Image: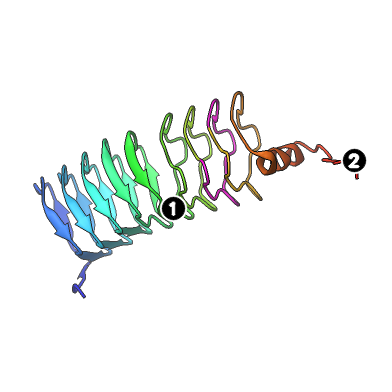
Amino acid sequence: MTEPVVGATFTGEDWYGEDLGAAAYRECTFRDVDLTESRSKGATFESCVFDGCRLNASQHTASAFAGCDFRGTSFFDATLDGCKLVGSVFVRCTVRPLTVTGGRWRGVTLRGAKLDGQVLDGVDLSEADLADADLTGASLRGCDLSGATLRGATLTGADLRGATLSGADVDSARWRGARVDLAGAVVLAESLGVVVDDGG
């Protein structure tokens, strides 16, 4: 197991194209670090801060960014394959386009994020904060959105078939043209105070 780097600060470093492998960082700060086209597999970043970093076109497989704080960081054209982003917070970040395959994003904060047209099929977004996010035309098929905050989010034309919406806060969300399955329709109807009666 890789010995973790703990409490270090990296400022203005050029890690362009670096192969990070299964590196481990805990409570580290990355400030204005260029991680463009970097790669990782099984890496762990725990309670780290990424401030003004560039992860453009980077590729991460089965890596974890747990409880991290991303500020003004760009993920343009990055790939996240089976990654864990549990409890991470994104503020003023570029998070599209992304290539995402599965992964656990439980409790992630993406308030007001621009995710229009993004494919997030099968991602665990339970208890995520997506308030005021733009998810226009996004694909959220099979996502776990249980307990998620979708208050004020724009889901116009989004595909949520197979998504779990139980306990989600959907107050004032925009749903025009969104596609849901029967279970999702029931949850949305009940959130509006409609009594669903199958006539039985």
Q: Is residue 106 at least partly visible in the picture? A: yes
Q: Residue at x 31, y 44 (%)?
A: 71
State the residue position of label 1: 105
Q: Amino acid at mark 1?
A: Trp
Residue range (magenta): 141-158
* Magenta stretch prevailing secondary structure: loop
Task: Classify residue 87 by image quadrant.
Answer: bottom left
Q: Residue at x 32, y 38 (%)?
A: 98
Whole-percent x, y for residue 145 in the image: 56, 48
Q: Quadrant location of the N terminus?
A: bottom left
State the residue position of label 2: 199
Task: Classify residue 104 by image quadrant.
Answer: bottom left
Whole-percent x, y for residue 103 in the image: 40, 54
Q: Is residue 1 left or right of residue 177?
A: left
How far apart in space, not on screen, are marks 2 and 1 (Cα)?
Answer: 38 Å
Task: Classify residue 25 by image quadrant.
Answer: bottom left
